[in-house]
Image: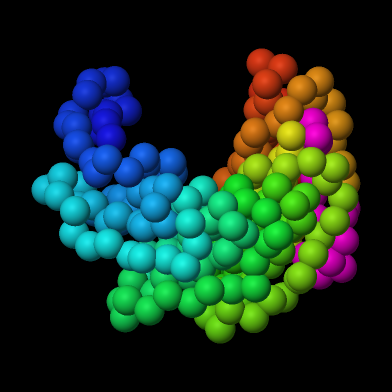
């Protein structure tokens, strides 16, 4: 694992991890820790300053595909290859498995207030959970025709944006629990989508080597 200074582009330090492959990584909101997911089903918690392993979280799922911290840093969500979504309480050490997916969990995201967790999967479904009790709020948002690989809540938490290898970006109305709009301008697989800080714009990037920006203000 390599740590870089974004301003200078200089390599700051290197962490030599375990033999188990590191598949995904997430910074804690305070930048003191990073979580890494491995193919053994473990999540390693590493200290950024010390570059040492502080703790290990063992999950029920195997091969951790995705990780996401809650905004306050007290919870860590993990998605596994066998479809299991887990919420780890970092203060108590407890792990809560949720009603997950039928296939690998590709992406996870918490809402800005930390109350909701969204997950996406190779099963083409999008789910939304109550991050506190694990209850499923929305069991399925259907519309994508292939893997759903990226997800983010809008800043006002009224909408959810997803990207898929079906070449589309979709915006979902969480109140109505249905698709609001589908953007299909990409000519190849789309791997990431993100809102602007104010939520008026949405960006996506795909294998067609293009970065597209959409107007979400309407």
> Can residue 171 be found in the magenta stretch?
yes
> Is 103 situated left or right of 76 in this image?
right
Q: Residue furthest left?
A: 50
Q: Residue at x 47, y 52 (%)?
A: 64
Identify whether 67 is placed above or below 189: below
Q: Residue furthest bottom?
A: 133
- Quadrant position of residue 205: top right
For the residue pair 155 and 194, the one nearer the viewer reads as 194
Q: Position of residue 40 (x, y in %)?
A: 39, 52
- The chosen color scheme is rainbow
> Is 167 situated left or right of 197 in this image?
right
Q: Position of residue 210 (x, y in %)?
A: 69, 18
> Is 180 situated left or right of 14 in this image?
right
Q: Residue at x 59, y 57 (%)?
A: 82
- Quadrant position of residue 173: bottom right
Q: Which residues are magenta?
A: 166-180
Q: Is residue 16 visible?
A: yes
Identify whether 46 is placed above or below 84: above
For the residue pair 216 and 18, the one nearer the viewer reads as 18
> Is 168 situated left or right of 108 in this image?
right
How many badges with numbers are in the image? 0
Q: Residue at x 84, y 26 (%)?
A: 185
> Can residue 190 be found in the magenta stretch?
no
Q: Position of residue 112 (x, y in %)?
A: 55, 62
For the residue pair 9 and 142, the one nearer the viewer reads as 142
Q: Is residue 108 visible?
A: no
For the residue pair 10 and 164, the one nearer the viewer reads as 164
Q: Residue at x 43, y 41 (%)?
A: 23
Q: Quadrant of the N terminus?
A: top left
């Amino acid at each position: 694992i390599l740590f870089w200074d974004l301003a200078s582009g200089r390599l700051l330090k290197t962490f030599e991890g375990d033999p188990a492959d590191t598949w995904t990584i997430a910074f804690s909101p305070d930048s003191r820790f990073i979580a890494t997911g491995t193919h053994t089903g473990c999540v390693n918690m590493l200290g950024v300053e010390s570059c040492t392993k502080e703790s290990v979280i063992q999950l029920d799922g195997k091969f951790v595909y995705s990780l996401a911290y809650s905004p306050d840093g007290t919870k860590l969500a993990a998605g596994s290859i066998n479809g299991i979504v887990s919420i780890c309480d970092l203060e108590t050490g407890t792990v809560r498995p949720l009603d997950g997916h039928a296939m690998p969990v590709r992406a996870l995201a918490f809402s800005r207030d930390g109350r909701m967790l969204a997950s996406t999967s190779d099963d083409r479904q999008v789910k939304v959970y109550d991050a506190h009790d694990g209850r499923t709020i929305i069991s399925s948002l259907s519309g994508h025709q292939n893997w759903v690989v990226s997800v983010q809540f809008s800043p006002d938490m009224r909408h959810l944006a997803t990207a898929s290898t079906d070449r589309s970006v979709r915006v979902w109305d969480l109140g109505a629990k249905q698709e609001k709009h589908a953007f299909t301008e990409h000519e190849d697989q789309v791997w990431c989508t993100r809102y602007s800080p104010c939520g008026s714009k949405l960006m996506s990037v795909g294998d067609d080597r293009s970065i597209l920006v959409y107007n979400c203000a309407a």
